[in-house]
Amino acid sequence: MTVLHPSPQTFAGAPKSTAARIGIGGPVGSGKTALIERLIPVLRARNVNLAVVTNDLVTKEDAERLRRSGLIEPERVLAVEAGACPHTVIREDPTLNMAAGDELEASFPGLELIVFESGGDNLASTFSLDLVDWWIFVIDVAGGDDIPRKKGPGVLKSDLLVVNKIDLAPHVGVNLERMLAEASAVRNGRPVIATNARAGDGVEALADAICRAVLFRE
């Protein structure tokens, strides 16, 4: 496993973490990177000083996509290569991600928020609370309306569940209202947000949730 752009400041003399750290996980193709692309301008419009760490198995594909987007300065995006199961570096041994976060804080004084995007994983994926303060799990309508009923740890334990690609519901035979109701039921009323990252639907509500939960802004 390797972290790209290592810095000596990450391992010695790095300042104590002050930025809030949140995780965004979910299966491959659920729309995690697309949601981050939509979130960045919304959060920056609220004057949130942020940076991103992406995770992939053996590439830096998601990081390069964000760097090319023009939405955020390229140097504010770091990439971690998991080299194994994606959840290894966000749960079992998150030190590479922690080091990347420390590097960003050393490079950008006043950083308020670091978003850690997990590599695509299954419903058992969770984040270590040594790495993040709060985390989001993203599923998508095209993955099937039975996902909430499967009750994976990501669905049950995340601080916020996002049901993405709601625009596809009529095209894949999903009863969206029922899927959202079942998601809320298995989570015992813990928050669920429906989004269409492609169009930006629900992104303001997602930004509201992040600002309230970890930045303590209304």
Image (spheres, rainbow, N blue to C red):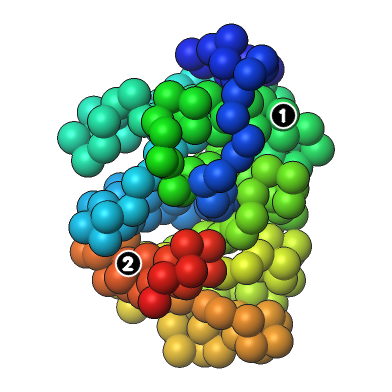
| Any part of residue 94 in sight | yes
Q: Is 33 or 74 nearer to us in this picture?
A: 74
Residue in the picture at 32% in, 67% down: 203
Q: SS for tag 1? A: helix
Using the image as rendered, state which of residue 64 and residue 77 is in the foreground: 77
SS type, badge 2: helix
Rate crowding at label 2 as few (under 14), some (14 to 19) or many (20 or more) other CA atoms within 10 Å. many
Report the number of numbered marks.
2
| Residue type of the residue flagged with mark 1 | Thr
Q: Quadrant of residue 10?
A: top right
Q: Earlier in the sequence, mark 1 or mark 2?
A: 1
The type of residue carrying mark 2 is Val
Q: Nearest the camera: 167 or 216? A: 216
Apparent side of residue 148 relative to residue 51 in the rendered image (left or right)? right
Q: Which residue is mark 1?
A: 95
**Can residue 86 be seen in this snapshot?**
no
Per the model, the C-alpha gap separating discs 1 and 2 is 30 Å
Q: Residue at x 61, y 59 (%)?
A: 134
Q: Which residue is mark 2?
A: 203
The mark lying in front, picked from 1 and 2, is 1
